Amino acid sequence: MGKDRNLTRWIFVLPALIIVGLLFVYPFFSSIFYSFTNKNLIMPSYKFVGLDNYKAVLSDPNFFNAFFNSIKWTVLSLTGQVVVGFVLALALHRVRRFKKVYRTLLIVPWAFPTIVIAFSWQWILNGVYGYLPNLIVKLGLMDMAPAFLTDRTWAFICLVFINIWFGAPMIMVNILSALQTVPQEQFEAAEIDGASAWQVFRYITFPHIKVVVGLLVVLRTVWIFNNFDIIYLITGGGPSNATMTLPIFAYNMGWGTKLLGRASAVTVLLFIFLLTVCFLYFAVISKWEKEGRK
C-alpha cells in the first residue's frame, strides 16, 4: 500500500519534473558546457578551448558597458518600483471606499503583454509621429520634438520610467497584501499614544512587512537584471549601445555573431553575479527573520 502511494506521488510529480528538466536543467548545464568550447551556430563541430571565452569576454569593453548599464537599469528601476509601489500600497490601505476599483485600475499596466506595452510606448515617444513629443511642441514647451528614443540619455531615462510604470503595480499588490496582516490593535494603540505617521511606519508597519519587501526585492532584482523583451522591443539596445544590457549583449553575441560559446560564457558570468547578489540579499532577510522571532 505504501509503495503504491509513493508511486502515485511520483506519477503526479513526473510531468513537472520533465518540464523543469527540459526548460531549466538542460539549458543551464549546456550553457556551462558550451562556455568552455568554441561552439558556433554555423559550424557543426566544436572543440574545448578552456577559459578562452571568459578571457575574451572580460577583455571586451562592450561587455563592461553592458554590465554597468545593467547595474544602472536594475538599481534605478528597482528603487522606483519599490518607492512607487510602497506609496500606492500605503495610500490604498487607507482608502475606505472603492478600494477594489482603485486597485484594479492601478494594476492595469501589469496586466498587459510586454509586446503591447513596448509598441504602445514606441508610438507615444516616437520623435516624428509620437503623441508626447508633438504635444510638447504644441504646448510651446520646446521648439523641436524631443528625441526620446534616439538620444542616449533620454532613451535610458524613458526605459527606466516605463519599467517603473510597468512593475510598480506588482510591488503594490504584494505590499498591500502584507499590510493586511499587520494587527490593527497596534495602529490603534499608537494613535492613542500620539505617535506620528513616521513613527507608526518605522516601528509598526515596516517591521511587520520588511521580510515580504525583502523577498520582493530579491525577485525583482533578478527579474529586472535579466529583463530582455521590453528593452529589445523599444530600443534594441541603442542608440549607440546606450541601453545595451547583459541579456541583450549575450543575445547579440549568440544570434548576431553566432558565437554561442562566447555568449554562453556571458550568461554564466551573469548567473554567478546574480547568485552572489541573492546570497547577500538572503543573508539580510535571514537576519530580519531572526530579529522578528526575538
Image (tube, rainbow, N blue to C red):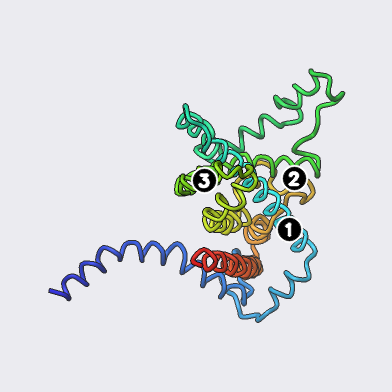
Q: Is 120 situated left or right of 290 in this image?
A: right
Q: Is 142 situated left or right of 82 in this image?
A: right
Q: Quadrant of the N terminus?
A: bottom left
Image mark for residue 268: none
Mark 1 Cα shell of 10 Å, populated few (<14), some (14-19), many (≥20): many
Q: Is 18 situated left or right of 53 in this image?
A: left
Q: Is residue 76 above or below residue 106?
A: below
Give the alpha-carbon distance from disc 3 to disc 1, as whole Å: 51 Å
Which residue is under mark 2? 156
Name which residue type carries label 2. Phe
Can residue 40 be seen in this snapshot?
no
Which residue is under mark 1? 66
Return the x and y of residue 4 as percentages of the image width and height.
16, 72
Contact (Cβ within 8 Å) of mark 3 with mark 1: no
For the residue pair 4 and 193, the one nearer the viewer reads as 193
**Dot 3 lies on which element?**
helix
Residue ID at (77%, 45%): 239
**Dot 1 lies on which element?**
helix
Return the x and y of residue 206 as percentages of the image width and height.
57, 52
Q: Is residue 33 above or below residue 203?
A: below
In primary-sequence order, the first of circles 2 and 3 is 2
Give the alpha-carbon distance from disc 2 to disc 1, as whole Å: 13 Å
Which residue is under mark 3? 189
Residue ID at (54%, 34%): 106
